[in-house]
Image (spheres, rainbow, N blue to C red):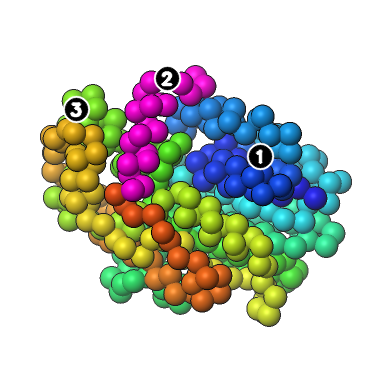
């Protein structure tokens, strides 16, 4: 049976699809192909997947009631990697209804689809480090209280976790939520700081630096994230009652934003013009993942340093994106 991957044209989703295909899995990809950022990027990711005979794709809005059942109800889907969501903390300030529809209603529709599948095995879904809000206890642990989100995006992800726990309790749907920490790498998202900074510096434009660069992020390279997703997918909850779990997926090594920019300057050979701005109300000063649980239960440790990961992104950006060799 194929693995259903939602958000297959997205950043993490496309990488997960490639990994699953490389180990001989059949993959059914779903994406609504919205225009939150340049569609050429999503089309390019899909184009890299299309040559695989074991990959198929359907353009579907998962938040549409019954859309998943209509498309896949008879295929006996047993495993799902649910990565489709409206991303972006700051964008949620301007488009709250879009986030509730995509992230909350979409997650509910996914839960309904999974519980209707006979012999369903495992739903792995994307949560976010944003659920920790302004938590000052570090590193962030899965056992910390996360009842005070500072953005609507974070509130939608916390809502997803609560709904998943409820469906596990009521209907026995086995599932695992992964709280991703600032994922970056080739084929990434243009709204993320590493992309924005790289583009601006190459174009000779200034960059906006919040809080004088005194912000720390647990930057996590996409290949490490994919390894974590697949390791979790292969090991559904067994002893847990209800069968619902949450894990951090981070690098466990926060990087100061100012130092992050220093590293980009060295890789690009360009000195950035930094414009300092106050920290925004939807931002947090620090993210820092406690990875004890992932290592204990799956033997997982992140392996890519910020220097190596940023180099891979910069090389991809210059050779493929700026050079125009991606599908546009």
What distance separates the C-alpha of mark 2 from that of mark 3? Answer: 21 Å
Q: Which residue is mark 3?
A: 205
Q: Quadrant of residue 79?
A: bottom right
Residue 134 on image: x %, y %? 31, 64
Residue 319 is covered by the magenta coloring: yes
Q: Which residue occupies 34% across, 58% down?
A: 218
Residue at screen point 29% across, 61% down: 254
Residue at the spot of label 2: 324
Residue 24 in the image: above or below residue 284 = above
Specify the label residue 162 is tagged with: none
Residues in magenta? 308-328
Q: Secondary structure at mark 3?
A: loop
**Residue at (45, 31) in percent of width and height:** 37
**x and y, in percent, of residue 121 in the image:** 75, 63
Q: Is residue 284 visible?
A: no
The reply to whether discs 3 and 1 touch (Cβ–Cβ < 8 Å) is no
Circle 3 Cα neighbour tier, 10 Å, few/some/many (<14 / 14–19 / ≥20): some
Mark-to-mark CA distance, 3 and 1: 36 Å
Disc 2 vs disc 3: which is toward the camera? 2
Question: In this rendering, would 169 be left or right of 189?
Answer: right
Q: Position of residue 261 (x, y in %)?
A: 21, 44
First along the sequence among labels 1 and 2? 1
């Amino acid at each position: 049976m194929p693995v259903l991957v939602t958000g297959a044209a997205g950043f993490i989703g496309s990488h997960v699809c490639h990994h699953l295909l490389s180990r001989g899995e059949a993959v059914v990809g779903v994406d609504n192909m919205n225009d939150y950022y340049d569609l050429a990027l999503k089309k390019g990711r899909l184009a890299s997947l299309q040559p695989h005979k074991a990959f198929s794709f359907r353009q579907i809005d998962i938040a549409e009631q019954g859309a998943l059942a209509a498309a896949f109800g008879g295929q006996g889907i047993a495993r799902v990697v649910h990565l489709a969501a409206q991303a972006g903390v700051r964008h949620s300030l301007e488009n709250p209804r879009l986030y509730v529809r995509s992230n909350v209603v979409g997650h509910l529709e996914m839960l309904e689809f999974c519980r209707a599948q006979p012999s369903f095995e495992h739903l792995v879904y994307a949560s976010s480090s944003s659920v920790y809000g302004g938590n000052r206890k570090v590193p962030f642990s899965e056992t910390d209280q996360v009842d005070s989100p500072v953005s609507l995006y974070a509130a939608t992800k916390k809502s997803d976790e609560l709904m998943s726990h409820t469906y596990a309790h009521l209907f026995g749907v086995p599932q695992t939520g992964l709280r991703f920490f600032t994922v970056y790498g080739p084929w990434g998202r243009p709204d993320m700081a590493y992309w924005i900074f790289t583009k601006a510096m190459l174009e000779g434009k200034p960059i906006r630096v919040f809080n004088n660069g005194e912000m720390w992020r647990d930057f996590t390279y996409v290949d490490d994230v994919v390894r974590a997703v697949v390791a979790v997918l292969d090991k559904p909850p067994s002893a847990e009652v209800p069968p619902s779990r949450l894990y951090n997926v981070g690098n466990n090594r926060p990087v100061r934003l100012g130092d992050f920019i220093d590293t980009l300057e060295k890789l690009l050979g360009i000195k950035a013009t930094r414009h300092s701005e106050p920290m925004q109300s939807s931002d947090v000063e620090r993210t820092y993942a406690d990875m004890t649980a992932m290592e204990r239960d799956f033997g997982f440790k992140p392996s890519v340093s910020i220097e190596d990961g940023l180099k891979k992104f910069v090389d991809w950006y210059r050779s493929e994106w700026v050079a125009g060799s991606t599908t546009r």
